Amino acid sequence: MFPKKLNQKLEVRKASNALRKLGAQDDLVDFSSNDYLGLSKNEIIFDNAHKFLIENNIKQNGATGSRLLSGNHKLYNQAEQQLCEFHNSPSSIIFNSGYDANIGFFSSVPQRGDIILYDEFIHASIRDGIKMSHAKAYKFNHNDLDDLEKRCQMERNRSPRDSEIYVVTESVFSMDGDTPNLLALVQISKKYQARLIVDEAHAIGLFGENGSGIIQDLKLENDIFARIVTFGKAMGCHGAAVLGSHALKSYLINFSRSFIYTTGLPPHSLATINCAYNELLKSDSKSRLLKNIRHFKSEIVNNKLEHIFIESNSAIHCCVISGNTKVKSIAEKLQHNGFNVKPILSPTVPKDKERLRFCLHSYNSLREITQVLNLLATFVRF
């Protein structure tokens, strides 16, 4: 018999029409994946990664151990140096995934007596890392700088002099697609001697020169304590990195458990990261994606859907449709018509803030974008 308490939790999910299931891949028009630039299917990257391994006489399927034992093969040093140069960072340290990077960073860096102030819409991986930390953590209202400043002032006034305040945000939020005022966030952090941490998972490849991210686009690299960049989205491969000072890298090597106690990435993953960044410098995928984003936003207006869409200039555009049952029904209708648009249900997002999440790509056609929004307009008015 399956444990009663666990079964009850599954039944609650079923009753609220929120039970998650794994779906099969399909041939629908892609408006759901994070492959914003189409690099996951890029044959040049695939072929160049293989060629790179052969030319360097690397015929190895796995890392053989953690990086502190036997897994720190030479491609790690090359990839991390490439990241430092591309992202204008003194140091970088690669983790196996964005989840591992956030768990490892937030569980180890903030100390007992420190304060973490995080945006209420921060990613689940950051929340999980914060839960593992010994620091006290408080959320501030989404992109609300007044609320953040009040909390900074309150915590700075009552905290010991040696307490650190960490402010945590994303440059593009994964469930809303919006962006905070990073210039103002930097000023608030400086004012209260707080350390700013920015997750750039959904900005890399899309914003800034050559897709280097919003932080570099605003020339704020030296004002950020740590940046988290991931490779499983626009870069089309796998892994993540924390960008920061040499001292931060040394600290994470010594105290980040998700770095210390896991097998390293195989050489092929590192070669693919290398080739993906090289291709990013030459590809026109970014310009095609930006064109599609502009067209999508204009079609929102043409279909009079502005009132249900969250404002966004990123590749993520969310249409708020309250209720798990209703948003799932509309998603199924879009899928039946050939468009893979996924519903985001509560409890992933707050109740009554359920939504359709449209992810735009360089390979979506203008016609596909027009068609899917015309259909959406029909379904939400039905």
Image: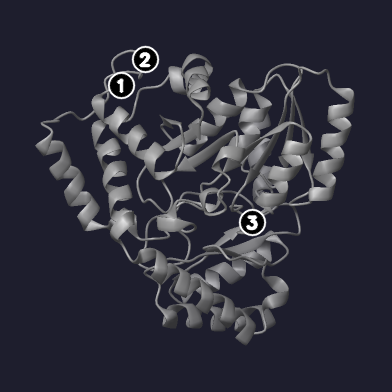
**Circle nearer the N terminus (3, 1):** 1
Q: Is residue 40 left or right of residue 355?
A: left
- Label 3: few (<14), some or many (≥20) within 10 Å? some
**Where is residue 331 drawn, in percent x and y?**
56, 68
* Measured Cα–Cα span from mark 3 to mark 1: 36 Å
Q: Residue furthest bottom?
A: 302
Amino acid type for the residue under numbered disc 3: Thr
**Where is residue 275 drawn, in percent x and y?**
26, 47
Q: Is residue 120 at all visible to an observer of this figure?
A: no
Depth order, front residue of 60/18: 60
Identity of the residue drawn at 80% across and 43% down: 148
Identity of the residue drawn at 49% across and 33% down: 242
Which label is found at residue 179?
Answer: 3
Secondary structure beneath disc 1? Answer: loop
Label 2 sits on residue: 68
Q: Is residue 62 left or right of residue 346?
A: left
Secondary structure beneath disc 2? Answer: loop
Depth order, front residue of 121/87: 87
- Label 2: few (<14), some or many (≥20) within 10 Å? some
Amino acid type for the residue under numbered disc 1: Asn
Identity of the residue drawn at 70% across and 52% down: 16
Q: Are marks 3 and 1 in contact (CB under 8 Å)?
A: no
Quarter placement of the N terminus: top right
Label 1 sits on residue: 72
Image quadrant in which you'd find residue 67: top left
Which label is found at residue 131?
Answer: none
Q: Are marks 1 and 2 in contact (CB under 8 Å)?
A: yes
Q: Are marks 3 and 2 in contact (CB under 8 Å)?
A: no
- Label 1: few (<14), some or many (≥20) within 10 Å? some
